[in-house]
Amino acid sequence: MKAAVLTAPHHLAVVDDLPEPVAGPGDVVVALEGLGVCGSDLSLHDGHRAVPGTPWVVGHEAFGRIVSVGPAVTGHEVGRRVVVEPNYACLECADCRRGRTSACARRAIVGMNSPGLLAERFAVPAAYAHVVPEELAPEDLAAFEPFVVARTAVRRSEITKGERALVLGAGAQGLLLSQSLLARGIEPVMIELHPGRLARAVELGATAARADDHGFLWLYETTGVAQALEAAVARLAAGATITLVGLDAAPLPLTMEQVVRGLYTIRGSLIYDHPHDFRAALDDVIAERVRPSVALTNRYAFEDAPRAFAEARRQPGKTWIEGPR
């Protein structure tokens, strides 16, 4: 079976000798139709994040069609199209019982501590394979998982209709977060240094931030660059909520005094919570309130996966890879 495997940093290869997956009692086996390339995938590719061993199958933002079903599975049938929720929580720990599956310490993170999905076929727990309508475009499914991340950040921030929100970064996550805001009747005001990315965000409904734009009660950080916050905080009103989506190991450029005097609320938003965030996001896409495909700009054939990964950081938008033909 074909798969794209990482053998060393910057060395991704398409092989044809991976063992066929077998569905466990509660699993389904899915034939890959497409997969989005994420920043965390690129961190593995570039050697900034260690893998459990090599060769390592990469990728996690996958969708495809069920080809076999485990004996204990109900509600999933061979031939149905599914999109994968690639974070398998234990559902037993205190965080899971509180509904915070995103904080599960025993979470299987597909492509990171659990093998990835950029293969002809893969097994996945049926509860994390969400059946989708046939009429949904493959491009929307290729960008669906990062849309759920963005939508969840908006949900957690508790922003309400009619507000204006400052968004840092018009990469894939910033675009998808802006689309989620627009779907809720909220104006996203974008800060983005790359002219092409900013133009794309504006084309899709965001407003470009002006030098005199101040008084925001809502700020979303999507760049993963801590220093980007420094100038943005100066644009906030007292009592603002700051939602952090991007990941950076650097300290925040904020003092305790700034937070206290500014009456700020700082929220971290990591992925999403199972199963309601995926289901709610799917409702948005089915109702055409959001088209996740707006974040995509580059498509590659499965055999070109090494080139897709090598070129992804230089592309203006999000990359996706089609399943094997």
Image (cartoon, rainbow, N blue to C red):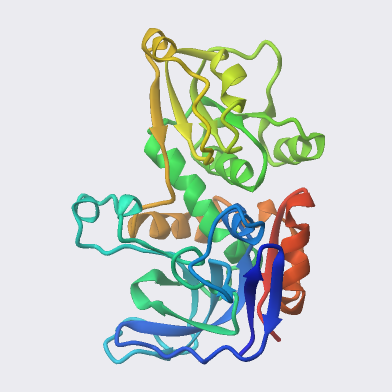
The answer to whether residue 163 is seen in the rendering is no
Where is residue 70 drawn, in percent x and y?
34, 89
Q: Is residue 47 above or below residue 173?
A: below
Q: Quadrant of the C terminus?
A: bottom right
Q: Nearer the viewer, residue 6 or 216?
A: 6
Q: Residue at x 76, y 61 (%)?
A: 310
The answer to whether residue 35 is seen in the rendering is yes
Where is residue 281 drawn, in percent x and y?
46, 55
Q: Nearer the viewer, residue 119 or 36?
A: 119
Q: Quadrant of residue 204?
A: top right
**How many marks can you see?**
0
Q: Is residue 26 above or below residue 241?
A: below
Q: Quadrant of the N terminus?
A: bottom right
Q: Is residue 114 above or below residue 121?
A: above
Q: Is residue 299 above or below residue 287?
A: below
Q: Residue at x 41, y 84 (%)?
A: 28
Q: Nearer the viewer, residue 150 or 279?
A: 150
Left or right: 113 in relation to 309: left
Where is residue 169 drawn, in percent x and y?
64, 35
Q: Quadrant of residue 96?
A: bottom left
Left or right: 296 in relation to 269: right
Q: Residue at x 47, y 69 (%)?
A: 84
Q: Nearer the viewer, residue 126 or 18?
A: 18
Q: Residue at x 74, y 70 (%)?
A: 306
